[in-house]
Image (cartoon, grey):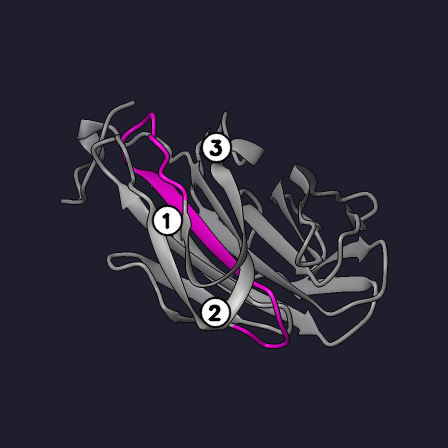
Amino acid sequence: MTAVRSSSIGAAASGTAVTVSAPAGTTAGDLVIVVVHCNANTTIVDNNGATPFTEDLNDYQNVGAGQTGSIFSRRIVAGDPPTYAFTLGTSTRWTAVAITFSGPDPSAIYDVAPTVGNSARDTGNPSFASLDITTLTNGAFHLIYGLPDGNSQSASATPPGYTVEQNGGNQGIAAAWKVISPAGATGAQTWTWTVSTPSITFSFAVKAAAVSAADGAGRPYWFD
C-alpha cells in the first residue's frame, strides 16, 4: 500500500551546491520526489553520480521574477547515499524538499506527470493557485507546491484538506498532498503568501499501487 513515509528540507542563503537529506526511514524500494527552487533564471541539474535522479520537469522559470524550479524523482535502491545533491548554474539562495513514498506503484511513478502545462507562474500577488488536474487512477497522491520568491518566504495559508509536508526555506517551498479517491478533478488549490510576491506553482500526481480486495486488514482499497 502506497503511503507518504516522511519528508525533509535543505536550504542555504547562497551557493551552487544543493543538498537535501533522505527523509527519515527512506529505504530501498521507496520513491523519492525532490523539488528544487532557486532565486535565479538558471539551470538545476542532478549531481548524484552513479545514483542519479531523473529531472521530470526541467528548469521551469519565472523569468521576470528571477526564479527557477525543477522536479526530480528516483526509485531508491540498496546502497543509495543518505544525502541527495544537485547543482545550480549560478550561486544564489535555494531550497530543496524531498518527499518519500513507501510501497509505490512498481511500474509507473506518476498518475499525472509534472509538465509545463500543469505548472504556473505569477508576477506578484498575495496568493496564487496550483492548477486543477484530473487524476486517472483511484488513490493517486495529488502533490501541490507553492514556490514564493523572496528571502525566507512561506505560505501563511495552505489549501484545506491537504497535508502540509514542508513550508519554508531560504527560497521558499510549500509542499502538500492529498489522496484523490475516486479518481477525478482535483480543483485549483490556492496558496496565500506571507507577503505579496511573485511565485511558481506545481500540480501533479503520484500513482499509488493497486490494493486487492483480499487485503484483509480493514484498510481502504481501490482498483486500477
Residue 24 at least partly seen:
no
Give coordinates of residue 192: x percent, y percent: 39, 66
Does the segment drawn in magenta span residue 133? yes
**Residue position marked by numbered label 2 in the rendering:** 167
| Residue extent of the magenta highlight | 131-153
Q: What's the amino acid at mark 1?
A: Ala
Determine contact: label 3, label 1, CB under 8 Å: no
In percent of width and height, residue 218 lies at 13, 44
Question: Is residue 167 in the magenta section?
Answer: no
- Determine whether, in the image, residue 87 is placed left or right of residue 167: right
Residue 43, percent across and down?
A: 79, 48
> How many C-alpha atoms fall within 10 Å of the one at disc 1: few (<14), some, or many (≥20)?
some
Element type at mark 3: strand
In percent of the image, x 54 and y 66: which residue is there? 197
Q: Which mark is residue 3?
A: 1
Instruction: Please give the residue where the numbered disc 3 appears in the rendered image.
Output: 110
Is there any visible trace of residue 190 in the rendered image? yes
Closer to the chain start, of discs 3 and 2, is 3
Tell me the kind of residue under disc 3. Answer: Tyr
In the structure shown, which secondary structural element does the residue marked by tag 2 occupy? strand
